[in-house]
Image (spheres, helix red, strand yellow):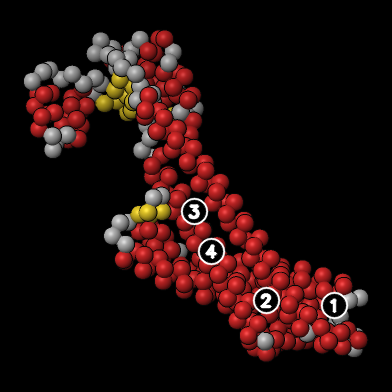
């Protein structure tokens, strides 16, 4: 029994390869459509990873600064640091003294002698501050609610940095983060569905072209699995070949883009990082592409052949 099943499997695989070579023009058309789809999928995947990297890099620099009055004692400051550090969304709290604040100001304005001259004419007017780094930049409101408490505001010389225009800018960044993450997932799912529909129609056309052959096979007693098997193997080959082609196309596009574009990024799409991610994960991407191509081809062919055989029973 085992030998019989093994022989049948070998014949199915062999027939799949034979059909692949025998219907070379149909194979080229199917591979071209799958290649386009897999190229779009791969580009969407790399673009989504790049978007997330860019957004993570932006949000990693989001913090909230609390400016302290000069009259705040060391004990009050340490107690405030302890309370802020105990908040759920706080990753770290860093104290910046007046001297350190002045050094940072001088470094940031090293090319502006007028500002440096103005601040050197007076005693250090810059306040000490606490720099709060959140765990989740999308949930800064909980930190702001604590800082807005009267007993905490009494220690502050100025409003926190999470206010006014900066608050609006941070909120816009967090909304953009959600949008691009959700849009990336939806886009990938949509392209997978489209590719399956394309392959389904291609295989359906191939089945109808061999309609007489399949009817004869059924009359001779061939099982449903034996009839369907070669189509599934054939489309799995389509997927594997299309995956390699799409990888070569994307590799060429990213290489050309990285070498010819003067700027390293286009909006949120950092071309340099996209090319680096692609080349450093080439083997994993190739494996994933082949698996996706095989899966799309097998699933589409399975549905198409099942529907055809049902119609002809």
Q: Residue under circle 1? A: 224
The label number, if any, that marks residue 271 in the structure image: none
- Pick whichever of labels 2 and 1 is earlier in the sequence: 1
Label pair 2/4, CB-CB below 8 angstroms: no
Image position of 137 with respect to 142: above or below: below
Q: Does the rendering let one see residue 3?
A: no
Q: Give neighbour class at mark 1: few <14, some 14-19, many 20+ (Cα, 10 Å).
A: few
Mark 3 or 4 closer to N-term? 4
Q: Mark 2 or mark 3, which is nearer the start of the sequence?
A: 3
Q: Give the mark nearer the N terminus: 1 vs 4.
A: 4
Let me know if residue 101 appears in the view.
yes
Q: In this view, does 255 lie to the left or right of 110?
A: right
Q: How far apart are marks 2 and 1 (CA)?
A: 17 Å
Circle 3 residue: 48
Mark 3 crowd level (few <14, some 14–19, many ≥20, 10 Å Cα): many
Residue appearing at x 35%, y 22% in the figure: 160
């Amino acid at each position: 029994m085992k030998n019989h099943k093994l022989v049948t499997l070998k014949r199915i695989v062999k027939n799949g390869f034979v059909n692949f070579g025998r219907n070379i023009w149909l194979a080229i058309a199917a591979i071209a459509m799958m290649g386009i789809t897999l190229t779009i999928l791969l580009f969407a995947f790399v673009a989504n990873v790049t978007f997330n990297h860019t957004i993570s890099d932006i949000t990693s620099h989001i913090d909230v600064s609390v400016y302290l009055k000069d009259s705040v004692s060391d004990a009050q400051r340490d107690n405030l640091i302890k309370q802020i550090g105990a908040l759920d969304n706080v990753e770290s709290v860093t104290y910046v003294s007046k001297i350190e604040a002045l050094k940072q100001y001088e470094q940031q304005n090293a090319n502006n002698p007028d500002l440096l001259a103005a601040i050197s004419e007076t005693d250090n007017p810059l306040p000490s501050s606490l720099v709060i780094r959140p765990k989740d930049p999308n949930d800064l409101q909980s930190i702001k609610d604590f800082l807005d408490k009267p007993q905490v505001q009494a220690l502050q010389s100025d409003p926190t940095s999470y206010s006014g225009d900066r608050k609006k800018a941070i909120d816009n960044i967090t909304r953009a983060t959600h949008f691009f993450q959700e849009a990336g997932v939806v886009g990938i799912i949509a392209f997978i569905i489209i590719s399956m529909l394309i392959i389904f129609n291609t295989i359906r056309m191939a089945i109808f072209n061999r309609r007489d052959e399949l009817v004869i096979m059924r009359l001779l007693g061939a099982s449903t699995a034996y009839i369907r098997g070669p189509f599934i193997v054939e489309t799995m080959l389509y997927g594997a070949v299309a995956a390699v082609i799409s990888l070569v196309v994307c590799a060429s596009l990213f290489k050309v883009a990285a070498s010819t574009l003067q700027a390293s990024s286009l909006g949120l799409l950092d071309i340099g990082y996209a090319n680096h991610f692609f080349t450093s994960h080439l083997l994993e991407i190739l494996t994933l592409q082949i698996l996706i191509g095989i899966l799309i081809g097998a699933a589409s062919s399975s549905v198409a052949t099942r529907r055809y055989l049902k119609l002809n029973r």
